[in-house]
Amino acid sequence: MNTKFRCIMLFLIFFSVSFILNPMLMNCFAQTPSPVLGGKLVYAIPGTPDTLDPQATSGTLTFQHVKSTYDTLLEPDEHGNLVPALAESWELSQENKTLTFHLRPGVVFHNGDPLTAADVKATFERILAPESTSPHKPEFKFVKEITVLDDLTIQFALEKIYAPLMATLASGWSAILPKRAIEAGHDFSTHPIGTGPFMFKEWIRDDHLSYTRFPNYWQQGKPYLDEIEFKVVIDATVQLQGLLVGEFDIIQSLDMHNVPKIEGNPETKLFTYSTALALVVAMNHQRPPFDNLLVRKAICHAIDQQALLDIAYTGGAIIGSFLDVGSPYYVDYSDMYPYNPQKAKDLLTEAGYPDGFKLTLALPQNYSPHVNAGNMVQNMLKQVGIDAKIQLMDWATWLSNVYRGRDFDMTIIGHTGKLDPNGRLAGFGDPEQNYINYKNPEVARLINEAAVTAEPEQRKIMYAEVQRLMAEDAMMVFIGTMNGLHGLRSNVEGFRMTYAIETPDFREAYKIR
């Protein structure tokens, strides 16, 4: 063996041993998996949407789908900053009353129509039409006129300053629809047509919704997946078992006690994120005895918020107002009603209910965490003499009877995050516009005034007062903001949840094969 060959062999042996013994060196050579094109991803959801029309509902299940089929003029990035989407730039006039958007050229809808300013105009005039019943119509009440300046330029003229408008335009209900389909009377409730990364394929109600890759999506090269399927699986246990055996790729109905099963399985992993949900126990202020402030305060003291978060949900932070703890406008009033069953009993006696009373607790059965929380609340109320009967209903019935019909005593629900506090608070203070029939003229005045105030610091002062008044009124039992927790198959990469509004984003998702 010649000297040159021996030197080469010694170098290779040394290098190999060094590589094995030095994990830092090994990490230098490790690479993040490259996106894989193709494949189908199955995402388990806890119920069926009431509609697929993003402008016709406030239902959370509808907005689970919006990011897949639609785009908005702008969107939040991972930190909540508003960034270009269908609009590549915009200008706000000096007096904050004219907003001009310049659309991205070359964008097409799923039906082949090119995106133009006329589509944007038709979309928002659909919401603002006299016959419109969109629950989001009030968010555009200060839009005086929408003008097409050219094919790719649209201008909004406002009657007065409206601070939340940019956040509203980045939210799911501001998804842009094709003008031609609107004018033809297309049924967006069952067949969405947008510019999003996936095209509608089919909806088998109460079973699944399927979407296929849109090959002409404006973000070149995306999405990576060929198909996504939203599989309706109400039972959280069935979701978990389906994930563990590979039937589902992602599940969202995950209880804390199931976390070890996912972490202990090499084929599955946890996906965690911060949510902006406001979990609440809501009371119907129009229905006795919840029209009595002392009764509402008693219920606030009777409920152990931290126990609910830790056991029924996925952990999180107690909140003391209707905003989430991550909001820059949040003010903490959580010490106003500490868990104190004896205090609750004393307040009930003072209110004229020394022996308690009976109530019905309406719960959406497709959300197992809310059902679990309901069972706990039932026991907590029993400790102070209140007999709560649980009434389970599907999501569509909950929306119809509770949210729209206001035919309920008490319910437990999570209010999804918003990009601006007005999105959460608008309507509260006016009993005509909120499902709990809460009325406080001063709260209504402050909310309306804050919406037309441009200065952020002044808005903070107003929203702080709103939160104080709501807390003093014991408007709801503010439970907390829970941690976001999904279960994923280990080969799923690139999945994310949209900041604050918590809609799944599959544009960069892929499966390693």
Image (cartoon, rainbow, N blue to C red):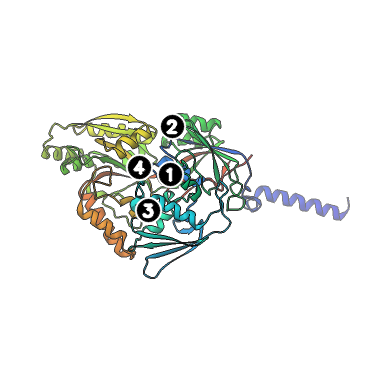
Residue on which disc 3 sits: 326
Residue on which disc 4 sits: 414
SS state under label 2: helix
Residue on which disc 1 sits: 484
Q: Position of residue 472 (x, y in %)?
A: 20, 50
Q: CA distance from mark 1 to mark 2?
A: 15 Å
Sequence-first tag of 3 and 1: 3
Q: CA distance from mark 4 to mark 3?
A: 15 Å
Q: Quadrant location of residue 212?
A: top right
Q: CA distance from mark 3 to mark 1?
A: 13 Å
Q: Position of residue 216 (x, y in %)?
A: 60, 49
Q: Residue at x 48, y 59 (%)?
A: 83
Q: CA distance from mark 2 to mark 3?
A: 28 Å
Sequence-first tag of 4 and 1: 4
SS state under label 4: strand
Give the amino acid type for the residue marked by disc 3 in the picture: Gly
Count the marks: how many?
4
Q: Kindly give the residue lying farthest to the right in the view shown.
A: 2
Give the amino acid type for the residue marked by disc 1 in the picture: Gly
Q: Residue at x 14, y 31 (%)?
A: 355
Q: Do the residues bearing badges 4 and 2 touch, measured as CB atoms within 8 Å?
A: no
Q: Which mark is residue 236?
A: 2
Is residue 307 visible in the rendered image? The answer is: no
Sequence-first tag of 2 and 3: 2
